[in-house]
Image (cartoon, rainbow, N blue to C red):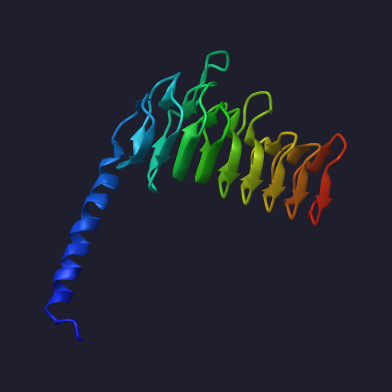
Amino acid sequence: MRRPAALFPISLALSAMMLAPVAGAREQGLTEIEKCQTISEPGSYKLVNNLTFKGATGACLAITVDFVTIDLAGFTISGPGGSLNPSAPLPNAIAAEDHTTGIAVRNGSISGFPVGVELSGDGSIVEGLRVSGGGPGPVGISATGIVRGNTVVGQHNFLGLGAGIIATGIVTGNFASRNDFGIEVGQGSTVIGNTARNNGEFGIFVDCPSNATDNTAVNNSVNLNLRGEGCNNTNNVAP
């Protein structure tokens, strides 16, 4: 028996009604960020405009809890830049406390901060960021977990120890240039497909045992340094 044609529009309407609450719930679970602030509740956050931080210490976005995701949504967090007191705590764009875990930061730009992203806990994800240093910057991105697809340029400090990326875990697809140190990777990591060029000291520095594969390090004072024993050194271009 053929189904009456009139039932098809009714069926489509019912399907739309059932799906609508789900879409609404997802939107309600997303918190918009319009200004620098402390994030003290787990959840997903998204920038809706550029942010500017003018403080001499502290963080534009300070994270104090586990399981926070921040989507910069293509916007920029700008810092004070210029000369700062190297003996004082330096300002961060985004910082998570030592006890936190499961922090994710992605998709945007950070400029003018001595410290770009510093996630002190475990299980972090940092991806798709463009970080340019400002002031006596010790590090562009520091995290333990997954660090991928980021670009960090111009991290210097008065001791010549500014680093583009300091990470332990999976470090892949990143680009570091014109820093003191390009990419520093902790023991037990997987380091794949990164590029470091024109850094003042090391291009890529890896603590062994780790897996270093398909990386390119050129025009650095020392291109590739695998410290210790047990590293897998495969298909790296580091003359």
Tell me residue 182's x, y (percent): 68, 40
Q: Position of residue 164 (x, y in %)?
A: 62, 37
Please, is residue 149 above or below residue 36 in the view? Answer: below
Furthest residue in direction top, as rendered: 87
Please, which residue is most extreme toward the right here? Answer: 229
Q: Residue lying furthest left in this view?
A: 6
Using the rendered view, name the quadrant where residue 31 is placed: top left
Number of marks present in the image shown: 0
Taking the image as shown, residue 125 lies to the left or right of residue 74, namely right
Could you tell me residue 230's position as x and y percent?
Answer: 86, 40
Q: Residue at x 68, y 51 (%)?
A: 195
Q: Residue at x 73, y 53 (%)?
A: 216
Q: Is residue 211 above or below residue 158?
A: below
Residue 50 appears left or right of 205: left
Q: Nearer the viewer, residue 198 or 238?
A: 238
- Quick check: 148 left or right of 53? right
From the viewer's side, name the closer residue of 191 and 89: 191
Point out the image quarter for the N terminus. Answer: bottom left
Is residue 190 rendered to the left or right of residue 142? right
Q: Position of residue 32 (x, y in %)?
A: 29, 38
Identify which residue is drawn at 18% across, 81% down.
3
Query: Looking at the image, which residue sits at the far bottom?
Result: 1
